[in-house]
Image: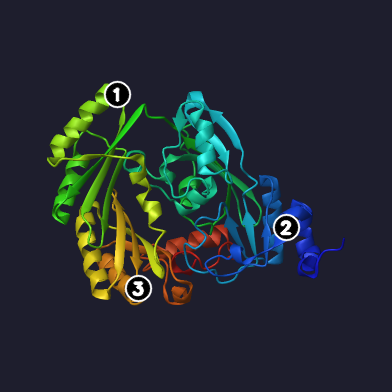
């Protein structure tokens, strides 16, 4: 059977060369579900190995095709719309756990493996990647690295960039580059893993990564404390962080018309954990209730609710988290908006604003106030009709010239996710 007219162009010219690399079954026309921040590419390419991915990028570079890397697709609306887009390069077929050196507490995994799938493999030896990103059943290792997404566990173990010890990437011209190693002590050379973390696929396509691991906890307990004021929240957060409790989760939940709630998670051996819980209760001096594990899914819940809405990520000084709640409440009330926010001890917060009017006005006012205090606000979700007037990243700061030079070194033709990152990178 001859190909349909809608697919015939894939069998011609440069597209045919790409089809020969990955196989005809893994090169298809894009559908509306493949849009990147509202921009629809022509095709989706699904290489099955690092070698195939390298060849795809080499041919695409020769053809001048603009590409967007994609893992599970859970965060494709993050960032600005691309200036132009010819194809998506999917890593979904690169899903193997390459090596689990459980005795050395490291593991190497391909970029298309989901976080949940990776965790199941590690759990067979009582270990974990101490990271809790959004949507782990969909999010892939490469995608989480590219967005540097992490949850409440970062208060104890650091972010994704702190856990990766080695990485393999395919550069825009198809060159495969490796940095780091398979042992935690290997820190010599150019720190490519940290450079890729949070780069949003604008520098290279991640194919494989090696991580340091931690043991699964024997027992976990979470407590929630309802606090009367933002000042009380700040006092509790600072007291816990200055103590010897070493929490593995600390988040603040706030919403329009609701109470301020601080959730704290502790992990450890049975007897020691009970003693630490009692120490926590004494430290906070307010009766705390045992909380279910689902309380740590509050960040994901911000993507559910009435539309139109915006969801953004804010970064402030840790000591300003309490006052951030007050600022959000004032600005949202002024605009007649509903709001929900989840904050974490490191100074990160995720905010959902809902309402038919004033969304972007409130967003701009919040960004101006946060940036005035040396913070930042990144837009992650926005109504399609408003996206053109809503810059995703805000002021880039004085690091922008350096970031442009790095981009020019890795992708001089600007073919990878052009325009999606800070300052139009």
Is 301 placed above or below 370 here? above
Q: Earlier in the sequence, mark 2 or mark 3?
A: 2
Residue 238 vs 281, above or below: the answer is below
Asked whether residue 182 is in view, the answer is: no
Residue 387 image offset from top left, x and y in percent: 46, 73
SS for callout 1:
helix
Image quarter of the N terminus: bottom right
Residue 342 sits above or below residue 273 on the image: below
Q: Which colour scheme is used?
A: rainbow
Would you say 2 lies left or right of 353 here? right
Q: Residue 162 carries which label?
A: none
Which label is found at residue 27?
2
Instruction: Indicate the secondary structure of the residue bearing disc 2.
Output: strand
Determine the image quadrant of residue 208. Answer: top right
Task: Determine contact: label 2, label 3, CB under 8 Å.
Answer: no
Question: Looking at the rendered structure, which numbered label has been put on residue 359?
Answer: 3
Compared across the picture, whether 370 is left or right of 110 comes to: left
Instruction: Read off the residue under disc 1.
Output: 270
Name the mark nearer the viewer: 2 or 3: 3
- Between 377 and 162, the residue placed more toward the observer is 377
Residue at 58% over, 63% down:
412
- Residue 10: x percent and y percent? 77, 64
Q: Distance between the residues labelled 2 and 3?
A: 39 Å
The crowd level at tag 3 (other Cα within 10 Å; few <14, some 14-19, many 20+) is many
Q: In this image, 79 relative to 351: left or right?
A: right
| Dot placed on the residue nearer the N-terminal end, 3 or 1 | 1
Q: Which of marks 1 and 2 is in front?
A: 1
Q: Which residue is drawn at 33% across and 62% down?
A: 376
Q: Which one is in front, 173 or 272?
A: 272
Disc 2: CA contacts within 10 A as few (<14), some (14-19) or many (>=20) = many
Residue at left offset 55%, top offset 30%: 100
């Amino acid at each position: 059977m001859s190909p349909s007219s809608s697919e015939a162009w894939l069998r011609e010219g440069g597209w045919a060369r790409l089809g020969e690399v990955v196989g005809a079954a893994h090169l298809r026309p894009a559908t509306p579900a493949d849009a990147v921040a509202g921009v629809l590419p022509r095709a989706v390419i699904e290489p099955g190995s690092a070698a195939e991915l390298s060849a795809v990028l080499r041919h695409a570079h020769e053809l001048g095709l603009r590409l967007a890397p994609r893992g599970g697709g859970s965060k494709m609306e993050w960032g600005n719309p691309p200036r132009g887009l010819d194809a998506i390069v999917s890593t979904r077929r690169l899903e193997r756990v390459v090596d689990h050196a459980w005795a050395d507490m490291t593991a190497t995994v391909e970029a298309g493996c989901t976080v949940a799938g990776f965790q199941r493999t590690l759990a067979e030896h009582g270990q974990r990647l101490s990271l809790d990103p959004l949507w782990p059943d969909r999010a892939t290792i490469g995608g989480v690295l590219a967005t540097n997404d992490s949850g409440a566990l970062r208060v104890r173990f650091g972010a994704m960039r702190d856990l990766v010890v080695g990485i393999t990437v395919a550069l825009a011209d198809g060159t495969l580059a490796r940095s780091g190693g398979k042992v935690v002590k290997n820190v010599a050379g150019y720190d490519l893993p940290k450079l890729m973390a949070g780069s949003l696929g604008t520098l290279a396509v991640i194919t494989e990564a090696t991580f340091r691991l931690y043991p699964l906890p024997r027992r976990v307990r979470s407590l929630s404390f309802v606090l009367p004021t933002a000042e009380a929240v700040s006092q509790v957060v600072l007291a816990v962080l200055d103590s010897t409790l070493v929490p593995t989760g600390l988040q603040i939940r706030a919403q329009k018309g609701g109470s301020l709630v601080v959730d704290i998670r502790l992990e450890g051996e049975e007897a020691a954990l009970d003693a630490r819980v009692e120490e926590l209760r004494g430290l906070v001096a307010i009766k705390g209730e045992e909380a279910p594990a689902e309380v740590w899914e509050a960040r994901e819940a911000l993507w559910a609710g009435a539309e139109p809405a915006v969801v953004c990520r804010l970064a402030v000084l840790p000591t300003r988290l309490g006052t951030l709640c007050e600022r959000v409440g004032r600005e949202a009330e002024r605009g007649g908006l509903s709001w929900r926010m989840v904050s974490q001890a490191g100074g990160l917060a995720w905010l959902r604003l809902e309402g038919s009017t004033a969304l972007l006005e409130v967003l701009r006012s919040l960004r101006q106030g946060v940036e005035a205090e040396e913070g930042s606000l990144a837009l992650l979700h926005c109504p399609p009709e408003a996206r053109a007037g809503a810059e995703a990243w805000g002021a880039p700061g004085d690091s922008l010239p350096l970031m442009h030079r790095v981009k020019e070194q890795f992708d001089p033709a600007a073919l990878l996710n052009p325009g999606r990152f800070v300052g139009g990178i």
